Amino acid sequence: MPMHSQEHDAGLTDPAVDPATPFACPGDVLALVTSTDPWSPAATVGTAIAARWGGNLTGCFVEPSVRMLRDSEGGPTVLGLLAEPRADDIDAFAAFGSFARQSGVNAATWTTSGVGMAQTLRQLGAWHDLAVIERDMVAPSGLFDVLGEAILGCQLACLVLPPRWSREISFERIVIGCNGSLESIRAMHAAMPFLRKASQVTLIDGGVRGSRHADGRLPHFDPFVYLLRHHITARPQYIRASSDLAGDLLLKQAADGQVDLLVMGAYGQSPTHERFFGGATRHVLEESCIPVLMRH
């Protein structure tokens, strides 16, 4: 059996590796649609992503009357998700399929949900790779305890669009916020298809959050090496700041660099009761004017 050098095994210098090869492409994209005429931003962005990467697409309309329900207020645990369209929903089902096909999506389906955001995303997250969500699909009063609860509990990468988003989605310039936590590493991993398409990637390294890695017994994750292994050369920046200030610095970097996408972990406020967002996540979610890819 031939021997391999360390550099070959790391994938840093192997000429046989094609940087254009898809990596963990979002094969199943979920769009939480808020309107059908015209199609809301989540529908258009979700369709564009599914078409670009050859993925499947699910459009889900969450009934407005239940969007503000918290998980504990969701009633029965049996979800109101319909695999087939209702009689009064058949037009939307057909229209979404036609819209998706015209946009280049090969396989699309439509469903509705009569339960809250958290239950809906937990259920659909079991068979999707990415959820596209409009930040203003809930009222500002429910941004953190409704939408936040849903994002933290679904175990799914979520692309959150800012209010009234009307531009085409772009992944040319991306900023990654990574502090060594599992949440930020998961977010970076989920963003890999977009990172490989980007012309400019900036990695803002905030170091390790907390002291759980301080004893050195856990394997170390180096975000720069990880990106290099996938032929992505990131521009490094280092920050040492509190959670609230870190969120502000991420947004400032995104604004200064005319960034198209911000990637970061979605952090819970407490390790034992992660119902609410932590400081940096709250600040970015509330203030960002560009799409943010989050994962808990």
Image (tube, rainbow, N blue to C red):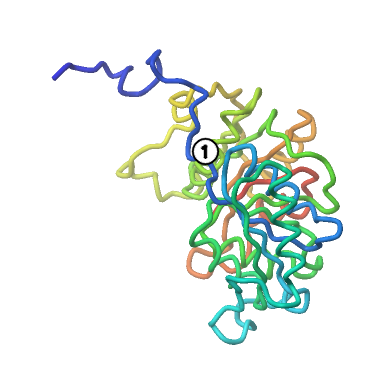
Image quadrant for the C terminus?
Answer: bottom right
Q: Quadrant of residue 276?
A: bottom right
Residue 52, image x, y percentages: 64, 37
Residue 76's place in the image compared with 133, above or below, is below
Q: Residue at x 52, y 38 (%)?
A: 207
How many labels, in total?
Answer: 1
Foreground pick, 209 / 234: 234
Residue 80, image x, y percentages: 61, 78
On the image, numbered disc 1 is attached to which residue?
A: 207
Outermost residue toward the left?
Answer: 1
Image quadrant for the N terminus?
Answer: top left
Q: Residue at x 71, y 67 (%)?
A: 61
Foreground pick, 53 / 126: 53
Please tell me whether mark 1 sits on a helix, a strand or a loop. loop
Residue 172's place in the image compared with 141, above or below, is above
At label 1, counting other C-alpha atoms closer than 10 Å, the crowd grade (few under 14, some 14-19, many 20 or more) is some
Query: Mark 1 is on which residue type?
Result: Gly
Residue 117's place in the image compared with 176, above or below, is below
